[in-house]
């Protein structure tokens, strides 16, 4: 297993480096069509005002409407939105009983008036030019969806800083690389834009999984939609700051990902989906599920074998794994113009951060085997992301 895993890690690293280095931003084009921004909110009173102000301060020249669906909040979320809606007619508030994020977004989609839909999380702050950059690619009629660049805005704790590096050298580097082969596996619900007719074509937002953004992205691929990534369209999001809240979030992500992988299993190793079926989806299965689940066990075996000298047989594989991690992290920092020294944080992350992710994966697998449903849950907001406009 270690030989095969190491070979696959090296191969994937080389492919991602090659693709990411060949990423080219599309030429700027004028685009000013009307757009609808949709947002689901549940107990987001601490953060939603900042999010709305960042959206409304955009330099986008086209007409925008912002639809906020309050999903049965028990705090001041609705009151905060109403205060803004009273002075800015671009904002509309819809209210419903608590039915979950997917149903709230579904309701927002029924209410939109324009042909491009921008998805934003209630804690995500846009920069002044984010919306303009996110929507530019739609000047090309062949593009059905655009992924923005989610970055962690609160860096007060070690856990949050680990997530920041994970976003940089994992999620965002992959999207940069996968754009060239049109095989992006998830257009993030925190910052993305999709044509409304493309959403309608796949039957709208599914309620069958917890990862509705991944589910929608794979459905768009099934209908041959072209999906691109815009690294300059930055949204600053609030990451969990404690192990407990992060574990809850990642368990939900892992469970939702497993649901989507199983639902769309017919796409894996299917020539009809080209790089998506033969590279990016198998990568999710192996590198985000299998490898994350077993790597801490390898680390434990290595530690247990130290007194017996058996570590010599395992150490070359461990060094190779760590080297690939550092190389990818360094490339990601260079591409995002961040200090290269950040890349070395990937080493302590392996010992401290990844075992927790492994626990979440195993918990999700066991829950999936039992067939038990998982609720969305709610992360406590701290409003620790500064507004950048």
Image (cartoon, rainbow, N blue to C red):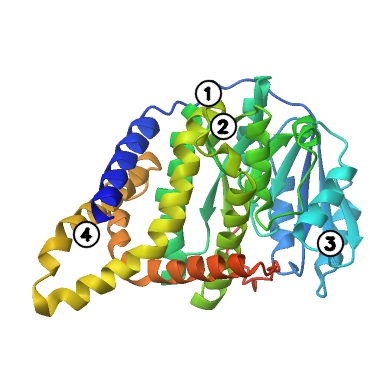
Q: Which of the two residues, 192 or 15, is positioned nearer the viewer here?
A: 15
Question: Mark 2 and mark 3 in contact (Cβ < 8 Å)?
Answer: no
Q: Is 69 on the left or on the right of 181, as rendered?
A: right
Task: Mark 4 or mark 3: name the one nearer the start of the chain.
Answer: 3
Which numbered tag is attached to residue 26?
1
Distance between the Cα atoms at labels 3 and 1? 36 Å
| Proximity of marks 4 and 3: CB atoms separated by less than 8 Å | no
Q: Earlier in the sequence, mark 3 or mark 2?
A: 3
Residues tagged 2 and 1 counted as in contact (Cβ below 8 A): yes
Which residue is tagged 4?
Answer: 318
Q: How far is mark 4 from mark 3, CA to CA?
A: 48 Å
Mark 3 or 2, closer to the camera: 2
Find residue 228 and name its label.
2
| Residue 317 percent across, percent down from the top left | 20, 56
User: Percent position (x, y) of residue 347?
Assistant: 28, 62
The 10 Å Cα crowd at callout 2, few under 14, some 14 to 19, many 20 or more, is many
Q: Is residue 238 shown left or right of residue 351?
A: right
Distance from Cα at disc 1 to Cα at disc 4: 39 Å
Instruction: Name which quarter of the figure residue 291 lies in.
Output: bottom left
- Badge number at residue 70: 3
Q: Nearer the viewer, residue 343 or 83?
A: 343
**Left or right: 119 with respect to 248?**
right
Q: Dot 2: what SS? A: strand
Q: Is residue 228 left or right of residue 93?
A: left
Which of the two discs, 2 and 1, labels the residue nearer the N terminus?
1
What residue lies at 61% left-to-right and 47% top-to-bottom?
188
Nearest to N terminus: mark 3 or mark 1 = 1
Which of the pair 317/139 is nearer the observer? 317
């Amino acid at each position: 297993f270690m030989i095969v895993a190491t070979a696959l890690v090296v191969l994937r690293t080389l492919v991602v480096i090659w693709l990411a280095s060949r990423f080219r931003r599309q030429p700027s084009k004028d685009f000013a069509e009307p757009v609808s921004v949709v947002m689901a909110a549940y107990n987001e009173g601490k953060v939603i005002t900042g999010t709305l102000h960042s959206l409304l301060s955009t330099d986008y020249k086209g007409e925008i409407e912002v639809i906020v669906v309050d999903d049965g909040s028990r705090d001041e979320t609705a009151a905060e939105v109403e205060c803004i809606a009273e002075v800015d007619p671009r904002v509309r508030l819809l209210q419903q009983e608590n039915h979950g994020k997917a149903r709230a977004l579904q309701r927002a989609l029924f209410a939109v008036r324009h042909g491009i839909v921008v998805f934003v999380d209630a804690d995500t702050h846009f920069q002044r030019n984010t919306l303009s950059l996110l929507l530019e690619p739609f000047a090309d009629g062949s593009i059905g969806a655009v992924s923005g660049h989610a970055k962690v805005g609160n860096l007060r704790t070690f856990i949050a800083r680990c997530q920041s590096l994970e976003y940089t050298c994992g999620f965002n580097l992959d999207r940069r690389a996968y754009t060239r082969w049109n095989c992006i596996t998830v257009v993030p619900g925190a910052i993305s834009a999709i044509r409304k007719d493309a959403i309608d074509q796949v039957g709208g937002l599914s309620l069958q999984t917890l990862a509705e953004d991944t589910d929608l992205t794979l459905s768009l691929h099934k209908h041959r939609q072209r999906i691109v990534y815009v690294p300059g369209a930055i949204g600053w999001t609030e990451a969990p700051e404690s192990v407990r809240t992060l574990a809850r979030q990642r368990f939900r992500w892992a469970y939702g990902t497993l649901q989507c992988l199983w639902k769309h299993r017919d796409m894996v190793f299917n020539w009809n989906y080209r790089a998506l079926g033969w590279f990016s989806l198998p990568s999710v299965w192996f590198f985000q599920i299998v490898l994350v689940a077993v790597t801490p066990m390898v680390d434990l075996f290595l530690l247990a074998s130290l007194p017996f000298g058996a570590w010599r047989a395992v150490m070359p594989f461990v060094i190779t794994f760590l080297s690939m991690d550092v190389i990818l992290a360094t490339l990601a920092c260079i591409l995002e113009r961040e200090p290269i020294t950040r890349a070395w944080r990937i080493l302590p992350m392996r010992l401290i951060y990844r075992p927790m992710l492994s626990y979440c994966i195993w918990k999700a697998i066991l829950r999936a085997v039992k067939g038990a449903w998982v609720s969305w849950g709610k992360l406590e907001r701290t409003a620790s992301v500064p507004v950048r406009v």
